[in-house]
Image (tube, rainbow, N blue to C red):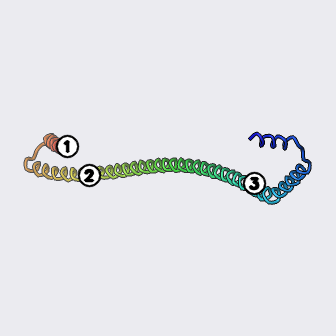
């Protein structure tokens, strides 16, 4: 072991320029080969990955903008729906009010018609009653005249009798 340490120690202390130059050339060749065959494809893969990530970010941003636009459209549609619903409710209230007014007007018209019909009926019944009363007065007058003829009353008695029968006819009514 000592010998190998010494040999190793001697090797380290001795500088060999040819070996260093050889190692340097080999290192440059290795770098060239790595650059040509490893770093090139590796950089291509890294560039592709970077482009892929950038496109994913752009797609995500576009999706976010589209979602934001869609959300705004939905809010606008909801707002329009609320306005339309409010208009429909207001329109229904107005139609209900108009129908209520129409019903009231029709009811008043019908009540007025019934009132007029009742008035006409009352007038007709009154006219009938007057005709009937006149008929009764006429028949009473005939009756009185026949009784007067039978009794041959004085004028004063006849006047009393006529007033009496007229009064009776008025009470019957």
Where's residue 101, x and y in %?
45, 48
Q: Label 2 to label 3, Cα distance in Å? A: 115 Å
10 vs 136: above or below = above
Instruction: Indicate the secondary structure of the residue bearing disc 2.
Output: helix
Closer to us: mark 1 or mark 2? 2
Instruction: Indicate the secondary structure of the residue bearing disc 1.
Output: helix
Q: Label 1 to label 2, Cα distance in Å? A: 17 Å
Q: Which residue in the structure is indicated by mark 2?
A: 125
Towards the viewer: 75 or 134: 75
Instruction: Indicate the secondary structure of the residue bearing disc 3.
Output: helix
Q: What is the quadrant of the C terminus in the image?
A: top left
Closer to us: mark 1 or mark 3? 3
Q: Which residue in the structure is indicated by mark 1?
A: 170
Is 161 left or right of 52, judged from the image as shown?
Answer: left
Q: Label 1 to label 3, Cα distance in Å? A: 129 Å
Towards the viewer: 20 or 53: 20
Where's residue 112, x and y in %?
38, 49
Q: Residue furthest front?
A: 3
Q: Quadrant of residue 153?
A: top left
Where's residue 38, x and y in %?
78, 57
Q: Residues within 10 Å of mark 1 (few under 14, many from 20)?
A: few
- Residue at 19 percent of width and 50 percent of height: 137
Question: Which is more N-terminal, label 2 or label 1?
Answer: 2
Where's residue 95, x and y in %?
48, 51
Q: Quadrant of residue 157?
A: top left
- Residue at 52 percent of width and 47 percent of height: 90
Q: Which residue in the structure is indicated by mark 3?
A: 46
């Amino acid at each position: 072991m000592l010998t190998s340490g010494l040999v190793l120690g001697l090797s380290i202390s001795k500088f060999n320029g040819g070996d260093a130059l050889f190692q340097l050339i080999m290192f440059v060749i290795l770098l060239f080969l790595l650059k040509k065959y490893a770093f090139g494809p590796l950089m291509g893969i890294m560039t592709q990955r970077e482009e892929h990530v950038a496109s994913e970010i752009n797609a995500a941003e576009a999706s976010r903008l589209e979602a934001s636009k869609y959300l705004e459209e939905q809010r606008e549609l909801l707002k329009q729906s609320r306005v339309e619903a409010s208009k429909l409710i207001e329109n229904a209230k107005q139609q209900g009010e108009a129908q209520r007014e129409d019903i009231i007007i029709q009811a008043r018209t019908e009540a007025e018609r019934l009132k007029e019909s009742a008035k006409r009926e009352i007038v007709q019944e009154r006219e009938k009653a007057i005709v009937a009363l006149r008929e009764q007065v006429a028949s009473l007058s005939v009756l009185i005249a026949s009784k007067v003829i039978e009794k041959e009353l004085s004028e004063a008695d006849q006047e009393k009798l006529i007033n009496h029968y007229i009064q009776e006819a008025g009470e019957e009514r």
